[in-house]
Amino acid sequence: MKTIRIVAAAALIGASTIALHVVQARQAGVTRAELQRQDLSVPGREVIQVRVELEPGVVFPNHTHPGEEIIYVLEGTWQYEIAGKPVTARAGDVLFIPARTIHSAKNVGNGKAAELATYLVEKGQPLLSLVK
């Protein structure tokens, strides 16, 4: 009986994590398109590249990643808050966000903002976790 409860609890936690990921991916005004996912030569690590787009005025709330994030701004003007410090970035700018660092992003321009996000992360972990 105890084993059944443990398995049920694990399934519930897993389902909650998947549901949270789906909700995050469908936030209004946010488009996230995974471009590639490849194993790295370091065991248990992978690289994931995602094109992220925000409509004008849209904020992607505080979150973390289970590894480093390298950002190349493709278009628009972004206002990031990284570990409590504001950073403005425009097309052609790059940023580095250390693993598990709390950060958010906002499109502060008049048009669409787009970035290429490259994640060097632990395999099997949710790519993105919201922080309250």
Image (cartoon, rainbow, N blue to C red):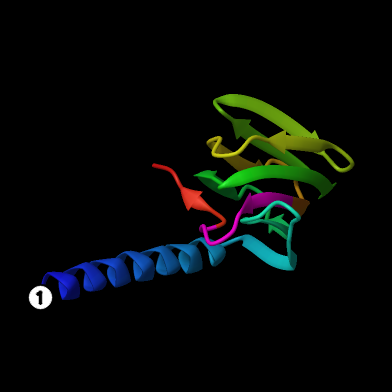
Q: Is residue 26 above or below residue 52?
A: below
Which residue appears at 36% of the width and 71% of the height? 15
* SS category of the residue bearing label 1: loop
Which residue appears at 57% of the width and 56% of the height? 127
Q: Is residue 60 above or below residue 16?
A: above
104 or 10: nearer the viewer: 10
The answer to whether residue 76 is visible is no
Which residue appears at 73% of the width and 51% of the height? 117
Q: Is residue 45 left or right of residue 75?
A: left
For residue 36, what is the image quadrant? bottom right
Instruction: Specify the quadrant that holds the N terminus.
Output: bottom left
Q: Report the span colored magenta.
A: 118-126
Which residue appears at 64% of the width and 26% of the height? 86
Kind of residue indicated by mark 1: Met
The percent coordinates of residue 41 (x first, y second) are 76, 55
The answer to whether residue 69 is visible is yes
How packed mark 1 is, by other alpha carbons closer than 10 Å (few <14, some 14-19, many 20 or more), is few
125 or 41: nearer the viewer: 41
Q: Is residue 86 left or right of residue 110?
A: left
For residue 5, what is the image quadrant? bottom left
Q: Is residue 122 left or right of residue 129?
A: right
- What residue did someone put label 1 on? 1
Residue placed furthest toward the left: 1
Total numbered circles = 1
